[in-house]
Image (cartoon, grey):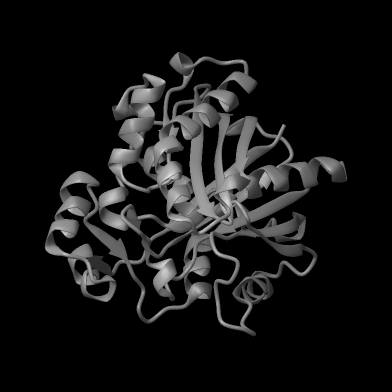
């Protein structure tokens, strides 16, 4: 059974207040008030002197379980929100693998689920390891991007992207953080730029994400009452309040600490929130929890996975 052997996150120290982003997106003072007071967004992480390699390197630096186990890593997956994350011909993931001595690993990117690609990467890593049949095999799942284009800096009317990264060491089996179930709902009808589709996406958002969470929980043979915690993507507070209302799930059991201080850290959100939950003592041995995310790009994805700590 796929297990997360270790999880690490990295957020740059520099922060930019969301008001400093208003001019480049031509946002009014009223729009900024809505972002801050209603969506509870305050600032986003930025590393003006660093590149994507620096972000990923920062996340892996916290992955102590990787030390001395590099020879066991068979796969390195980079979960991406956007298809292009650096200018051609740079390849920071390959550079990082060279630094780490992961010369035996197959390296590739995972995308097309937008901000939910991190969960897809965990599932894919587990399936690959299981197919190999090597109980000692490991996979390294990376997430995180630079906000280097206007599209990669803001989700219109919804959130601001923050820079950061995460690193997960995945094993084919383990005693903790075992993957119980994974559910993903892909909506191809949203692969359009029509305004009506954007409005429909907002309308069905909470219900669709709630259904994905319920599907993952049911697939694990659990009920929502048994779920101790939800580790979300950091889109904003309002979206998650709507999901909790749909699920009839306590809002205080959704880890939203990083929304106001880090912003939406692309595919790394759920794993950064894992670290926050761990530091706060919210993850208790034997208790199930859920990672959940939604993505919009070429279509829409609503996904969730249930795990047992």
> Residue 66 appears in which quarter of the rendering?
bottom right
Quadrant the N terminus occupies: top right
Q: Is residue 98 left or right of residue 135?
A: left
Q: Give the residue drawn at x 44%, y 49%.
A: 196
Between 73 and 111, the one lying in front of the other is 111
- Badge count: 0
Between 9 and 269, the one lying in front of the other is 269
Please tell me whether residue 198 is drawn above or below residue 291 in the rendered image.
below
Q: Taking the image as drawn, is residue 143 in sight?
A: yes
Q: In this view, does 247 lie to the left or right of 173?
A: left
Q: Give the residue drawn at x 24%, y 70%.
A: 21
Q: Taking the image as drawn, is residue 136 in sight?
A: no
Q: In this view, does 8 lie to the left or right of 111?
A: left
Q: Give the residue drawn at x 51%, y 52%.
A: 296
Point out residue 287 in the picture as x, y percentages from the top left corner.
Answer: 50, 22
Point out residue 189 in the picture as x, y percentages from the top left corner.
Answer: 59, 46
Point out residue 148 in the picture as x, y percentages from the top left corner.
Answer: 43, 76
Point out residue 162 in the picture as x, y percentages from the top left corner.
Answer: 37, 62
Please tell me whether residue 101 is drawn above or below residue 257 in the rendered image.
below
Between 224 and 288, the one lying in front of the other is 224
Between 211 and 125, the one lying in front of the other is 211
Please tell me whether residue 115 is drawn above or below residue 162 in the rendered image.
above
Q: Give the residue drawn at x 18%, y 66%.
A: 19
Q: In this view, does 268 lie to the left or right of 220?
A: left
Please tell me whether residue 237 is drawn above or below residue 216 in the rendered image.
below
The furthest residue to the bottom: 89
């Amino acid at each position: 059974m796929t297990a997360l052997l270790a999880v690490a996150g990295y957020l740059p120290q520099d922060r930019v207040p969301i008001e400093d982003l208003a001019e480049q997106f031509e946002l009014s003072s009223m729009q900024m008030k809505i972002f801050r007071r209603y969506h509870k967004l305050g600032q986003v992480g930025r590393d003006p002197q660093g590149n994507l390699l620096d972000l990923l390197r920062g996340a892996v630096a916290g992955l102590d379980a990787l030390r001395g186990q590099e020879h066991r890593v068979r796969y390195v997956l980079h979960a991406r929100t956007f298809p292009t994350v650096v200018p051609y011909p740079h390849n920071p993931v390959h550079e990082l693998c060279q630094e780490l001595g992961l010369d035996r690993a197959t390296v590739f990117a995972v995308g097309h689920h937008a901000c939910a690609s991190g969960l897809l990467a965990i599932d894919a890593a587990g399936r690959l390891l299981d197919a190999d049949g090597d109980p000692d095999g490991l996979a390294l799942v990376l997430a995180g991007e630079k906000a280097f284009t206007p599209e990669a800096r803001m989700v219109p009317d919804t959130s601001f992207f923050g820079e950061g990264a995460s690193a997960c060491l995945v094993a084919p089996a383990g005693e903790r953080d075992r993957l119980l179930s994974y559910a993903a709902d892909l909506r191809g009808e949203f692969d359009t730029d029509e305004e009506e589709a954007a409005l429909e996406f907002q309308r069905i958002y909470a219900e669709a994400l709630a259904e994905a969470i319920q599907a993952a929980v049911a697939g694990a043979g659990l009920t929502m009452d048994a779920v101790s915690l939800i580790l979300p993507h950091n889109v904003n507070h309002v979206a998650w309040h709507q999901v909790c209302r749909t699920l009839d799930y306590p809002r205080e059991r959704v880890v939203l600490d990083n929304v106001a201080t880090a912003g939406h850290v692309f595919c790394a959100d759920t794993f950064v929130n894992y670290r926050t939950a761990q530091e706060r003592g919210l993850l208790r041995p034997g208790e199930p929890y859920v990672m959940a995310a939604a993505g919009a790009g070429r279509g829409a994805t609503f996904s969730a996975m249930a795990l047992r700590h």
